[in-house]
Image (cartoon, rainbow, N blue to C red):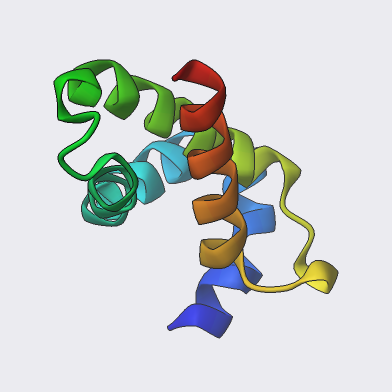
Amino acid sequence: MEKRLNEIIEDVKKDPVLREQLIKDYTPFIKKTTNDFLAKKFNFLYEDAMSIAYLAFNEAIEKYDITKGNFLVFSRYIIRNRIIDFI
């Protein structure tokens, strides 16, 4: 699945419908990444952090380069960094 996801990101970049579907399909991943980072310490920021996480996931789609590694690892990195910037 990971390899396939990495390969379809280029198509997703060009098609807004595919992009929207990918974001919907990976909502559990986005939520888990956000929850794991916020834990209990920053839980009161959850709503704002989720908005930032969705924007960060979209940013990861835009900036992803298949030659540089796994998309989910990259997107987790972008999400965490954007949330850190926010906090």
Q: Quadrant of the C terminus?
A: top left
Residue 43 x %, y %:
16, 30
84 vs 10, nearest the viewer = 84
Q: Quadrant of the N terminus?
A: bottom left
41 vs 1, nearest the viewer = 41
Q: Is residue 19 above or below residue 25?
A: above
* Residue visible at 61% across and 45% down in the picture: 61
User: Residue 45's quadrant in the figure?
Assistant: top left
Q: As drawn, is 67 to the left or to the right of 22?
A: right
* Residue visible at 46% across and 29% down in the picture: 83
Identity of the residue furthest to the front in this view: 41
User: Residue 10's quadrant in the figure?
Assistant: bottom right
Q: As drawn, is 20 to the left or to the right of 58?
A: left
* Residue visible at 61% across and 43% down in the picture: 60
* Residue visible at 72% across and 52% down in the picture: 64
Q: As drawn, is 6 to the left or to the right of 76?
A: right
User: Residue 65's quadrant in the figure?
Assistant: bottom right
Q: Is residue 76 above or below residue 39?
A: below
- Count of numbered marks: 0
Residue 24 x %, y %:
27, 44
Residue 38 x %, y %:
28, 39
64 vs 8, nearest the viewer = 64
